[in-house]
Amino acid sequence: MRFLFKTDYEDDIRLMPHSGYLVTYGVLLALLAVAPFVLSSYIVSQLVFVCIYATVGVGLMILTGFTGQASLGHAAFLAIGAYTAAFLQQYNVPFPVYFLAAGLLTGVVGALVGFPALRLQGIYLVIATISFAFIVEEILARWESVTHGNEGMRVKTMQLFGMAISRDSPSFYFLCLGFLILTIVGTLNLLRSPTGRAFVAIRDSETAARSMGINVSLYKVKSFAISAAITGFAGCLFAHKLSFISPEMFTLLLSIEFIIVILIGGSFSLHGAVLGAIFLVMIDPLLTYLKDDLPGMIAGVASTFGAGKESASQIQDKAAAIASANGLKGAIYGLIIVLFVLFEPLGLYGRWLKIKLFFQLFPLYKRATFKRQKIYVKSERNR
């Protein structure tokens, strides 16, 4: 067990509490650096999606995990960033310019959404963000002079410093990875600042935050703007990765996927955004496995236990029909959400912390260590 003796107030806000973090992250970065040269193009492509989804997860975590504001409209922010990049690219605007424009415009829209959301909490705020997502989706489909409607828009290959960067090239992978690292480090510094501490205070208790002189309305709008801006930047990279965008790509299901990223990973840790993104990207290969391989395996097991050839074939057909049923992906998402809410509210990162602490304190570990106790005063019970 490692004991940390803090001798300075700065010890509470260090990026690296001890040298072990530096070694661990150094090894991880080295592995990620060699990944595009030793792994297949498919796996590298999946890693790019992990970086993009994790970036969105970090942005959503600032709003939901650290400020306590719910949102089911982040697919709309991703769409605004993607369409801004695609539109400006038609006028030969260089990548750095439209990349910044995508983030800034999305941040402004996020701030505008944050103003009417100030009077809403809980389920009403969720409904408001869903309505915003539907409005943006409808605008994208109807504003054909700008978005080309349901026909969609082609996104040309990125040009950076006079070089063409293909969506499948190692350069694009490093660009997405670098932006994810920059986003995580920037968010860590934000959380160490007075602004970040104000976000956390609002999440824990708005009444207590107001009593300490925090302008709750201002910081809620800031949180919406920062979260939306990060998602807009990710939307630009998302558009380049897909090379084609259309309104039906940015639906409510995509917003739910972003919620799953922070729910599965852990809504109070930036590590959780990465873990949740990895989990989410693995869903599609899992569905492919269920459709292509699992029915044959079930039929083989049935044959082993004495089922005839015709019976095994019928079992395989039924299994294939279930695996190919419409709505299976949504059902899996719902099951995942229910299971994590019931059995692991802290997500995958929370489970890792429990496992690590178990071995550190064994045999003195207590199961109630991570239980969060809430004590309310009378003024907060009806908040």
Image (cartoon, helix red, strand yellow):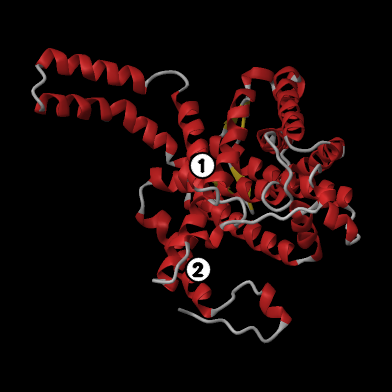
The image shows residue 83, relative to residue 230, as above or below, that is: above
Measuring from the top left, give residue 279's x and y in whole percent. Answer: 46, 45
Report if residue 166 is visible in the image.
no
Q: Nearer the viewer, residue 357 or 19?
A: 357
Residue at left offset 68%, top offset 54%? 374
Measuring from the top left, give residue 288's x and y in whole percent. Answer: 36, 31
**Amino acid marked by disc 1:** Leu
Relative horizontal placement of residue 323, taking residue 181 as reference (left or right): left
**Amino acid marked by disc 2:** Tyr
**Does dot 2 land on a helix, a strand or a loop?**
helix
Q: Which mark is residue 31?
A: none
User: Marks 2 and 1, how far apart in space?
Assistant: 32 Å
Quarter of the C terminus within the rendering: top right
Which residue in the protein does label 1 denote? 342
Residue at left offset 33%, top offset 17%? 321
Q: Nearer the viewer, residue 348 or 32?
A: 348
The image shows residue 346, relative to residue 290, as above or below, that is: below
Residue at left offset 47%, top offset 21%? 327
Earlier sequence position, callout 2 versus callout 1: 2
Q: Which mark is residue 25?
A: 2
Measuring from the top left, give residue 274's x and y in whole percent. Answer: 53, 52
The image shows residue 253, relative to residue 374, as above or below, that is: above
